[in-house]
Image: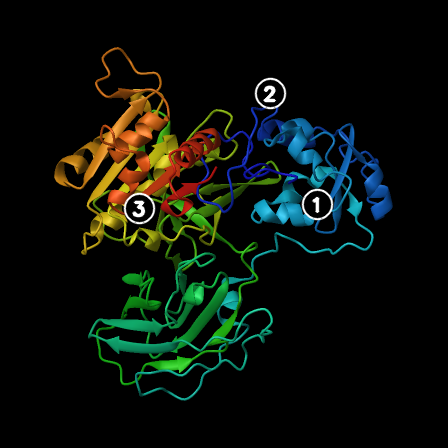
Amino acid sequence: MPWCNCCLSKQSEQEHDPPTAGNPRNKVALRPGHSLMDWIRLGNSGKDLTGVGGVSRDVAASELAKHNRQEDAWLAVKGRVYNVTHYMDFHPGGVEELMRGVGKDATSLFNQVHAWVNYESILQKCQVGPLRGGLLFSASKPMQPLSQLLFGKKGEKGEPLSGKAIENKSSSAPSLSSAIMPKPSNPRLDWFQQLGAITLVLYARQVSRGLGKLPPWVRVTLDEGGTKVGIFVCNVGGEPGQTYEARLELSAPVRWPCSAVRVHPDSGKVEVVLKKETETLWKSFGTPAEGHGAISQDLQAESEFWPVYLADETQVNHNTKVLRFQFSDRVCFTVPVGHHFRVQTNIQGVIVARSYTPIVPSLKSSMYDCDSIYLMVKSYPDGALSSVLCKLEVEQKCMEVSRPVGNFDVRCLNETSRLFLVAAGTGITPMIRVIVHILADGKKYCKMIKLAFFNKTEKDILWKEEFSSLSKEEPRFSVLNILSEASDGWPEARGRISRNILESLLDVKEGQSTSDALKQEPTFYCICGPTPFTEKAQSLLNEMGVPKSQYHCFLG
């Protein structure tokens, strides 16, 4: 592949990257002076990085094929040809990985791991010109105005609905070939009310589990007038990218934010609770708006970003903060456990993006706050984006976030009796919501949650007191802190990730094999940390004979 995961958008960021699909990918240590900020400075220095004098020109495939050497390297992505000769030493995946795409159209290789990378911004100063005969399309389209995106150019009122059930009007829905996706049945929308609130209930299809299936997530929007509501459901029925959208004109205004947005992963049921502006019982619900009931395959995933501002921050340790962002528009998202956002901003004319897994504000939180985004951000001096995030002022507006992204389905833990979480550094972030989710499960099927948390020194341990307090209050949870550079008085474990540590979590008895210990009770491992850490842990689990169905790596 021409790029490793996290390369163009997060160069020099040393933190882990949250869940993505596929196998671990190697990253290399960049030489000093080759961070993303160094690349941006080089692009702004006036140096000709195109190799053709900065004058755009058409490039034939035959000409592209001639530029296939490290000292003369061109490649094409989505119909555009770039001279990446000068970028070689800046690529976190190393020269060898980048060379795999040189001299040819690398679009398909790029798409396998870089659906969210804003390559146009990163490589803008390297663009030679269009590939003759290539397909030109943008991976970073401008966002539509909120009202147009949610409700079309104008609303369409119908007859008032006095009944509770609302039929879908999908005449304006885009057609979709059955060869691409089987035509699903329309979800049913229902509603009920109290004096001061209204609840919208969407009965989507039951969400199946298995390979290639994803948990649904929901986006809710409200116009400034408080009457036009949009409910967008993605991964309907567990099918990746299959969407349904309800667009409604309410009988009277409601308040923002939502009181609650609940998604029931197995049944597909969605509940949206909104407070009425005036406490009164409505005689009718309202009417469907234009575009209501549209079912389609999601085509805007790469281009949809939403502006946010910093609401407040909390210092966690010497170099890490919890930042609470809120949306500038009236929009909120549910985020499946273990999924993440892409966060991006413009730095010196270059769009720099990075993935962050949202957390809950406390281990005692019972529900994810869909109106706010809590990010645990560790700042590094050379971190192109993390250093910017940690220097934001409250109410400052300069960031955008994507819709939720990820491939983890927390329902794989439904029948797990023993859960082992192995994290390093900010690899703790996806584990936080996993812990809260399992402990909040009223069935209490999971009898044991063990967290093995690896850090360099004691001052680097994130939420040390919070995890310690939880272990005292919750008998099912325990934490083991392991330091690689512990002080002489450190009372807990020392070292790095090893088979002994992983087997100690499993509590293998003397004379007992690892495979026998795994068979005692349903067991699952979650792994997250820097790429070398994750690769090592995965290798050790394979050596131990842990089936791939019994562990998940949140990859960096």
Q: Name the residue under label 2.
A: 31
At 18% from the left edge and 52% from the top edge, which residue is drawn? 444
Which tag is nearer the camera, tag 3 or tag 2? 3
Q: Nearer the viewer, residue 221 or 116?
A: 116
Left or right relative to 21: residue 117: right
- Number of other residues with Cα within 10 Å of mark 3, as a class: few under 14, some 14 to 19, many 20 or more: some
Marks 1 and 2, how far apart at CA: 26 Å
Q: Nearer the viewer, residue 386 or 294?
A: 294
Q: In which quarter of the image is residue 390?
A: top left
Give amino acid for label 3.
Answer: Val
Give whichever of discs 3 and 2 has the lower sequence position: 2
List x then y, in percent, for residue 65.
82, 41
- Number of other residues with Cα within 10 Å of mark 1, as a class: few under 14, some 14 to 19, many 20 or more: many
Q: Which of 415 and 177 is in front in this view?
A: 415
List x then y, in percent, for residue 174.
57, 74
Q: Name the residue under label 1.
A: 106
Q: Name the residue under label 3.
A: 434
